[in-house]
């Protein structure tokens, strides 16, 4: 079997949905997998399932938003499986609502899990991967909400745009290395995200879970893509070192509209500030993959 057979992967949010789909696909392709999640009970079930299928897996209980937990989690995974060469920063939550109805506590909870969690994951594993050398891969799960503003989920959209920016910079910074980056931007996928997120959000706000509203969103998502198919697509894309992974064509016209708006703003701009050598130098440096200020 070819890559990723024999490699060790660390997958966050692996107890459910897309993370579980990625873990299953990695195991099917011969990789060892550290299943990391905040949900211990589901992790144990998933580990049993994958072990029965002959997979080499280990579980790591980890809250990705807690910087204090990451180094120990990485050590535990590497003691069990060997050096991690594949990091899938996949755990994420949704919540809030319209921006003027989103409590600050919920905004911060979402940013800490969806963005800071990915940043800390990279800070933990990238130095290890760099110092060991050889092929490695980092996957960040963003969302279609990272390419398109989605009304009603402003906190989530902001976090996923941040994940897209983070991933694009990481790709540029690793361009000259054997470390590849992929960015997953799914549309609707049939997972537990509405239930998981509502439970988490209720805890943050110290109120009861709104089970009915979570079930309504859950019923809509149940029509979405199969998370196992998304997992297979992710592993195939990583094998081919593809950067951007999308799951639904339906959003293309909306993404195009956004890009047309950006292009139109440049086309309509009257150049009133005149030629700017600094801007020219910075644009040149960025296109050459260099740091625009230090170059
Ligand atoms: P899910 O809720 O089925 O799975 C997410 C897993 O992350 C759960 O097992 C949960 O326990 C875990 N998790 C939540 N907070 C955590 C934390 N602080 N630390 C560690 N683990 C934590 O949801 P799904 O849909 O599989 O979500 C995975 C990723 O896919 C997320 O980043 C989500 O934003 C993204 N996504 C999902 C879409 C969908 O339609 N389901 C669409 C676009 C993106």
Image: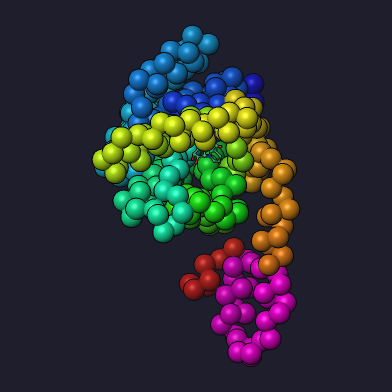
Q: Nearer the viewer, residue 175 or 119?
A: 119
> What is the x, y in percent for residue 190?
57, 29
The residue located at (29%, 42%) in the rendering is: 204
Image point (55%, 22%), residue name: 24
Q: Examine the rendering and report whether any part of residue 237 can be seen.
A: yes
Boundaries of the magenta span: 262-288
Residue 274 percent location from the top left of the image: 64, 90
Quarter of the view holding residue 281: bottom right
Residue at point 56%, 45% (across, down): 143
Which residue corresponds to the image point at 53% horizontal and 45% vertical from the top-left? Answer: 142
List x then y, in percent, for residue 291: 52, 67
Dominant secondary structure, magenta = helix
Nearer to me, 148 or 84: 148
Name the residue nearer the viewer: 217 or 9: 217
- Compared to residue 142, the image places residue 237 above or below, namely above
Up/down of 2 relative to 135, above or below: above
């Amino acid at each position: 079997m070819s890559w990723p057979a024999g490699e060790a992967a660390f997958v966050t949010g692996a107890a459910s949905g897309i993370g579980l789909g990625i873990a299953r696909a990695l195991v099917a392709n011969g990789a060892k997998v550290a299943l990391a999640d905040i949900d211990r009970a589901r992790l144990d079930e998933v580990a049993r399932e994958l072990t029965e299928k002959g997979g080499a897996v280990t579980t790591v209980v980890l809250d990705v938003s807690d910087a204090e937990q990451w180094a120990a989690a990485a050590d535990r995974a590497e003691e069990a499986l060997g050096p991690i060469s594949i990091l899938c920063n996949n755990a994420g939550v949704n919540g809030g609502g319209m921006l003027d109805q989103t409590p600050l506590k919920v905004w911060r909870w979402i940013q800490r899990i969806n963005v800071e969690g990915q940043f800390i994951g990279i800070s933990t594993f990238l130095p290890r991967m760099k110092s060991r050398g050889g092929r490695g891969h980092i996957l960040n799960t963003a969302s279609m909400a990272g390419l398109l503003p989605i009304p009603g989920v402003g906190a989530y959209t902001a976090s996923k745009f941040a994940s897209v920016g983070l991933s694009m910079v990481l790709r540029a910074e690793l361009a000259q290395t054997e470390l590849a980056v992929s960015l997953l931007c799914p549309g609707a996928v049939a997972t537990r995200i509405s239930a998981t997120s509502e439970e988490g959000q209720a805890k943050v706000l110290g109120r009861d879970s709104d089970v009915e509203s979570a079930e309504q969103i859950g019923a809509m998502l149940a029509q979405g893509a199969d998370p196992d198919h998304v997992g297979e697509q992710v592993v195939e894309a990583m094998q081919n070192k593809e950067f951007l992974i999308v799951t639904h064509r339906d959003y293309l016209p909306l993404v195009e509209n956004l890009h047309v708006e950006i292009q139109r703003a440049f086309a309509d701009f009257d150049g009133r500030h005149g030629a700017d050598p600094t801007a020219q130098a910075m644009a040149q440096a960025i296109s050459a993959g260099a740091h625009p200020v230090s170059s």
